Image (tube, grey):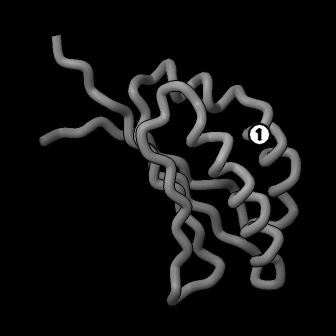
Amino acid sequence: METRTIRVVARFAAKTDRISNVTDILSALVEPTRAEDGCITYELLHNPHDPTDFTFVEEWTSEEALERHLATEHIAECRRRIGEYVEGDADIRVYTLLK
């Protein structure tokens, strides 16, 4: 039986005057997340043409690994802190590889 990994693209739009706050909050997720069991790739990208645009590109071994990640304290801390610094909710999309 083939096991397919889970891919996630999570995009955040910082308020123009809060880019440094969002940078700090999102950057703090990288190291602990990369150490999580089931994390294959966890990259934080910043758009050079739109400094308010931040995107995580992630790959997880399974849906269960992703669910464990979403239940971690560092994700909970991010959720508590980031709301006032971003425009709207994060755009989080979950995918499996088609080909």
Instruction: Give the residue displayed 50% in from the left and 56% down from the top.
Output: 43
Disc 1 designates what residue? 74
Q: On the picture, is 88 further left or further right than 48?
A: right
Instruction: Give the residue displayed 57% in from the left and 24% down from the top.
Output: 67
Give residue 83's quadrant in the image: bottom right
Q: On the picture, is 45 further left or further right than 83?
A: left
Instruction: Judge whether 19 appears above or below 80 on screen.
Output: below
- Residue 4 at x, y percent in the picture: 27, 26
Quarter of the image where the N terminus is located = top left
The kind of residue tagged 1 is His
Instruction: Give the residue displayed 72% in from the left and 69% down from the top.
Output: 23
Give residue 59's quadrant in the image: top left
Crowding near pointer 1: few (<14 within 10 Å), some, many (20+)?
some
Instruction: Judge whether 22 appears above or below 63 on screen.
Output: below
Instruction: Give the residue displayed 87% in from the left and 53% down from the top.
Output: 81
- Is residue 86 or residue 77 the one in the foreground? 77
- Is residue 87 or residue 36 the one in the foreground? 36
Quarter of the image where the C terminus is located = top left
Q: On the picture, is 5 further left or further right than 43?
A: left
- Residue 74 at x, y percent in the picture: 77, 39
- Residue 5 at x, y percent in the picture: 32, 31
Residue, far left: 99
- Residue 87 at x, y percent in the picture: 73, 68
